[in-house]
Amino acid sequence: MAGSTEHATMRAWVGEMAEMCGPDAVYWCDGSIQEAEKLTAEALASGELIQLDQKILPGCVYHRTALNDVARTENLTFICTDRKEDAAPINNWKSRQDGYAEAREFFKGSMKGRTMYVVPFSMGPVGSPFAKYGIELTDSIYVVLNMRIMAHMGQKILDILGKDGDFTKCLHSKAQLDIDKRRILHFPEDNAIWSVNSGYGGNVLLGKKCLALRIASWLGRKEGWMAEHMLILGIEYPDGRTEYVAAAFPSACGKTNLAMLVPPEGMKSKGYKVWTVGDDIAWLRIGKDGRLWAVNPEAGCFGVAPGTGLKTNPNMMKAVRQNTIFTNVCLKDDKTVWWEGHDDPAPTSALDWTGKPWRPGMKDENGKPVPSANPNSRFTVPIKQVPCVSSEVDNPDGVPISAFIFGGRRARLAPLVYESFNWQHGTYVAATMASERTAAQYGKQGEVRRDPMAMSPFVGYNMGDYFRHWLEMGKKIPNPPAIYHVNWFRQDENGKFMWPGFGDNLRVLEWILNRRAGKVSPAKTPIGNMPKAEDLDLSGLNLAAGVIDKLLAIDKQEWLAECDGVENYFKTLGDRLPAELLQELASLRERLK
Ligand code: GTP
Ligand code: SPV
Ligand code: MN
């Protein structure tokens, strides 16, 4: 198909990229179900996809990535700008010229023997003032089928772009999946993204982290809005009123789970309902009413499989029963899927994510259990299949946000929840958050690293400028969200999580909403406002004696040591770090003395 568009520069660009990559054919995707079925059949025939049992899992397929290609590769991800300081100091940087020159060699002839698919897509509801359009060129059917779920895709985008609409130029080739030649390159000054030699989600679904966070954060700074690594959820009160909050946790730290939590029994009787607007990314703008409004630019969820079960996340377990792409999970002999934390008993015989026979209790040479699913294995599912999806998910104006919640995995230090004193203090709290590394990134697992706003891998420009943008936004929003920090992952002396997490996190959200409504007064501490234990609904939890006090405890010596860590981190950020954040650090130290 030739693609029905009169956009001359788009056609010229597609032609130029095809010239470089040398595919046997160029195919323009229309986004139809017939097209998806045809591409799926091709991928099943070639082995790129494996068919699952269509009675038990209708519309579901299975995919394995290359062994060296199971998570985002931050060390191979670059922001390419003319001046280094516009991307430094956290991002890897290349000049535009060097970025293109090096990658061009890797793209040359990379699609020989393959088809180049032209994928027109929208991030954000089509036609919304928030929406951003892109065209992804790719030689992977897996990418096309994932993009069809994750974004709004097809001919309607070409229609909206017309003869000369703006779009992000996205180029992807799996090439040889050679990790030494893998590059994820962003050219914000050209509104372009080039990704080569990977087939893993965040590296190749270019509408997601690359466009909706790295490029969008650059645009947001220029245009006065925000692109954040945040879920969006609505909490409906018994009287039918709904309030919305947005929360940023680093990768694999609980956004998807919080976005669709099920209220615990004791609280359900109060009549709360939870509605999911988004599970990973939020774009935020100041509304006419002076509040901050958020849309979810994505149409699907690319969620972590391990740990997902009927007890932890029943909504997602129901969502992934149909029309889902499973990547790197365990493949059972009956052509269904399994992962660690699944409700079904472990299969007695199955293939693990690498395709090797697997049995429960298998150990590696060091005596460590061998998981059947890769720890970063994922499912791709339309968000509309989530039973508690919000009726506002396609609202072009989004939803108004009452509170921002930040958090990470901290075995020690950070209490269950605290409230910042104001926007500037909240910006400091978010800018200094840290978390233990998870399987969503390569690198030493468990190591604590600073991850400001859960955006460290995703800010498309200078981190100091990003903090400045946050501070400036705070001055411009007449009625800004209040800012909170949470920690579901504090451990006891035996390394056990002290807080039950998941649905019970609603107990903490309730305190936050009660604070917003002025229904409870807090305990004032050096780090922020905290709940009095009696203001948290802990009914039916059976927490052991003293646990809630430990969860709410603040150790001043540990916090002073944390301040030293923050000071060292700030030193790495260079001279664009806003002075306000240094003032906040000094005030915190003062309060802790
Ligand atoms: P990305 O998609 O990588 O951005 O991750 P995410 O932030 O959406 O994380 P997700 O909700 O998928 O959770 C990641 C892992 O953390 C899963 O294994 C969950 O089971 C686990 N998890 C989520 N919420 C909680 C919680 O409240 N407590 C505990 N202990 N584990 C949790
Ligand atoms: C994350 O790592 O934060 C994800 C998954 O949401 S990926 O899209 O691969 O980046
Ligand atoms: Mn994410």
Image (cartoon, rainbow, N blue to C red):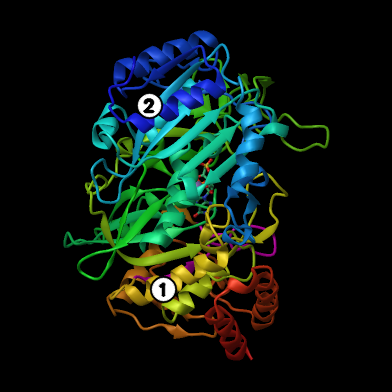
Q: Quadrant of the N terminus?
A: top left
For the point 31% across and 74% down, which residue is it? 516
Residue 389, position in %: x, y? 29, 44
Residue to which mark 1 is pinned: 472
Residue 359 numbered tag: none
For the point 56% across and 32% down, which residue is it? 339
For the point 31% across and 31% down, which residue is it? 7
Residue to which mark 2 is pinned: 11
Residue 212, position in %: x, y? 43, 47
Q: Is mark 2 within 8 Å of ligand 2?
A: no
The magenta span reads 481-500
Whether residue 497 appears in magenta in the rendering, the answer is yes
Q: Is residue 517 above or below residue 489?
A: below
**Which corner quadrant of the image does residue 519 belong to?**
bottom left
Q: Is residue 348 above or below residue 570?
A: above
Count of marks placed on residues: 2
The secondary structure that dominates the magenta segment is: loop
Q: Quadrant of the C terminus?
A: bottom right
Residue 540, position in %: x, y? 41, 61
* Proximity of marks 1 and 2: CB atoms separated by less than 8 Å: no
